[in-house]
Amino acid sequence: MKTNQTKNYVITDDTIKNIVCGILVLIFLIILIIVSELCYRNLILAPFIVLVPAILLSIKWSYILLHRGITNKPICTFSKDGIIIPNYFKSNQLLKYQSIHNIRVISTNPQFVDILIHSDAVNHPSKNLHLRLHYPFKKELLQENIFKFTNACSNFKLKFVIEEHENSEK
C-alpha cells in the first residue's frame, strides 16, 4: 500500500532557551512592577508613565517565550501547501510556495542564522519575513536545522541563497 504524502519538514526551536528567556523576562517584569509601585507611591509620574508600556511588553514577551518553550512550537513547518509560520495571537500564517520569491539564509555568527523569506503574502512593507535559528543550549541542532531547511527548500523547488559573512569584530 503506497501513500502519496509529501514529507513535512519541521524546524524546531530550542525549548531550554525559550524557557530561560521567559523566566528572565518574568523576573524583569516583577522588578518593573516593584519600581512602578514605588514611583506611584512617591508621586514620581515621569518614570511611571514609561514603566507602564514596559510592563505590558514584558507580559507579552514572557507569554510568547514561555508558550514557545512549554508547547515546543516549531519555528516553521514545510507542508504540502506552503510554509507554516506559527503566530501566537492570531491563526498560523501560511506562505504558499507560489508566492515565495526567494529565501536568504544569512550566517553572520556561529551561534545563530537569520532567514529572510521574500513573499507577496507577508504583511510587512519590505515583504520579508524574518526567522532566526538560535540554539545557545543545543548548538548541534543549528547545523542540523540549517541542513533540514535547505533540504526542504530544494525539495519544494524554492530559490534560496546561503550568505556567510565574516565577523569583523575581533
Image (tube, helix red, strand yellow):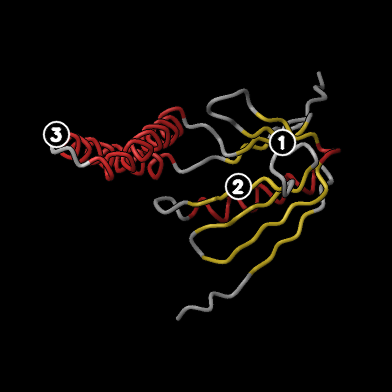
Q: Residue furthest bottom?
A: 170
Secondary element type, mark 2: strand
Residue visible at 68% across and 52% down in the picture: 116
Is disc 2 in contact with disc 3, using a CB cutoff of under 8 Å? no
On screen, residue 141 versus residue 5, left or right, reads left
Secondary element type, mark 3: helix
Secondary element type, mark 1: strand
Is disc 2 in contact with disc 1, using a CB cutoff of under 8 Å? no
How far separated are the C-alphas under marks 2 and 1?
12 Å
Residue 129: image location, x then y, percent: 67, 45
18 or 2, which is in the foreground?
18
Vertical position of residue 131 compared to residue 67: above or below: below
Q: Is disc 3 surrounded by few (<14), some (14 to 19) or many (20+) residues within 10 Å? A: few
Front label number (1 vs 3): 3
On screen, residue 167 versus residue 91, left or right, reads left
99 or 76, which is in the foreground?
99
Front label number (2 vs 1): 2
Q: Which residue is mark 1?
A: 83
How far separated are the C-alphas under marks 2 and 3?
42 Å
Residue 166: image location, x then y, percent: 58, 75
Vertical position of residue 96 compared to residue 141: above or below: above
How far separated are the C-alphas under marks 1 and 3?
50 Å
Q: Which residue is mark 3?
A: 41
The residue under label 2 is which amino acid type? Leu
Front label number (2 vs 3): 3
The residue under label 1 is which amino acid type? Ile
Q: Which residue is mark 2?
A: 131
Residue visible at 83% across and 24% down in the picture: 4
